[in-house]
Image (cartoon, helix red, strand yellow):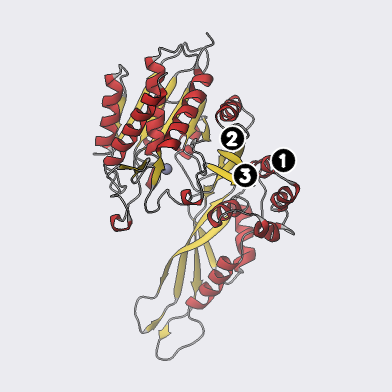
Amino acid sequence: MNWHQVIEEVTCLTQELIRFDTTNPPGNETPCIEYIAAVLRQEGIEPVVLESAPGRGNLVARLRGDGSLPPLLLMGHVDVVPAEAEHWRHPPFSGDLADGTVWGRGATDMKQMVAMELMALLLLKRSATVLKRDVILMTNADEETGGKLGAGFIAEEHPDLIRDAEYAINEGGATSIELDGRLFFVCSTAEKGTARFTVRGQGEPGHASQPHARNAILPLSRALVRLIETPLPLRITKTAALHVETMAQHLNGELAAALRGLLDPATHDASMAALPLAEPVKRRLAAALRNTATPTILRAGTKINVIPAQAECDVDCRILPGTTLESLTEEVRAVVGNEVELEFGPVSPPLESDPASPLFETIRMVLAEHEPGSTLVPGLITGGTDAKRIAPLGIKVYGFVPMRYEGASMTGLAHGHNERISVANLAFGTRVLYDVVSRFCAALP
Ligand SMILES: [Zn+2]
């Protein structure tokens, strides 16, 4: 394999994908999807391209194996979140290559991974590798606004294209963490669900020139102050326990104790303070250990001179595997008290896959070769991804984007200003992903 040439190719692919403005909304992913389809056709792979709505293209391509084992699905999305160009050092849809770095919206979420997955498929095809598992590439629209017109559309309306897959590799919540000079790669094996709700205060109307204390804003405000200031209780999932324990086993006594201390309510706060981790990493870790309820949208009052009889707030609530609506209601009630109403919307359930699997083991082995001394740890995604869309088909989804930690400047790039990826990391990711896919899917010679 001429890796030098492969890296040049995957860098070009990443740049080209970034140059399609797939800001969602409105998305307009079809031209980007058609570009990927053209690349595949040039190499003799015929993809299926399906629009869920005008301009909302999705692609599925399959490299056939001998059918002795079920397929591996490589999934990704090409839509991106909006970018405020005035804050960027290189225009967000330039795909500029400068100082060994590719710049642009989608460079880490997740056009780089789509390019790497596409590259893996092309390399397997070019080398005519005999496969025991089919390798399926699914590239979707619409992930950033929930995936209904992307992975959801494929899973619900064209499930036969992917439903025989046993495992999927998807984007993940974290890439890698560095602690005390040791590198930990995270493979997400669990994902939080959502249980959004509205908190509502009731009061009595009246003329604002003659105030009274039954203003609906009062009970609502009291409840919200408590909700923002009081974290919901710790809930230790199997994934979180393994995440912390696996890292602790590879660290010195003091750090290991601090990590393990996170799992105990009595020592949690002090342990978090003692850990030498960047703030965003700590926030992610804290959110992985409890349900979270974040007030985001307020509504009260219709007229400046009328005391509102009703005031409400929508709360973005993310729930851990094992949480039920009943247990969540109890947790929230204990914080907000009884003077407000709670109204829950539809629940999107959390996911948890078993980290003890042949795919997890393959990823662990490949990483140990490419990054000796590193450790693979299972992790939990605090947000939502397309994994939720395809999990109902029975596919075990792992969130794994092979990227090396390159310092604190790497955190917050996804959805932030100046999103970018180093060519070194593209090279690393492409080689690791190719090795994982070929080792997991190729028939032994
Ligand atoms: Zn993403």
Quarter occupied by residue 299: bottom left
| Amino acid on which the number 3 mark rests in the picture | Gly
**Is the residue 264 above or below the residue 65 in the image?**
below
Quarter occupied by residue 114: top left
**Is the residue 258 above or below the residue 426 in the image?**
below
Distance, label 1 to label 2, CA atoms, is: 22 Å
Neighbour tally class for label 2: few under 14, some 14-19, many 20 plus, Cα within 10 Å: some
Distance, label 3 to label 2, CA atoms, is: 29 Å
In the rendering, which numbered label is found on residue 441? none
Distance, label 1 to label 3, CA atoms, is: 14 Å
Residue sitting at the far top: 445
Which element carries disc 2, helix, strand or loop? loop
Which element carries disc 3, helix, strand or loop? loop
The residue indicated by pointer 3 is 181
* Callout 1–callout 3 Cβ contact below 8 Å: no
In the rendering, which numbered label is found on residue 249? 1
Marked residue nearer the N-terminal end (1 or 3): 3
| Amino acid on which the number 1 mark rests in the picture | Gln
Q: Establish whether ligand 1 lies closer than 8 Å to the Cβ of label 1.
A: no
Neighbour tally class for label 1: few under 14, some 14-19, many 20 plus, Cα within 10 Å: some
Marked residue nearer the N-terminal end (1 or 2): 1
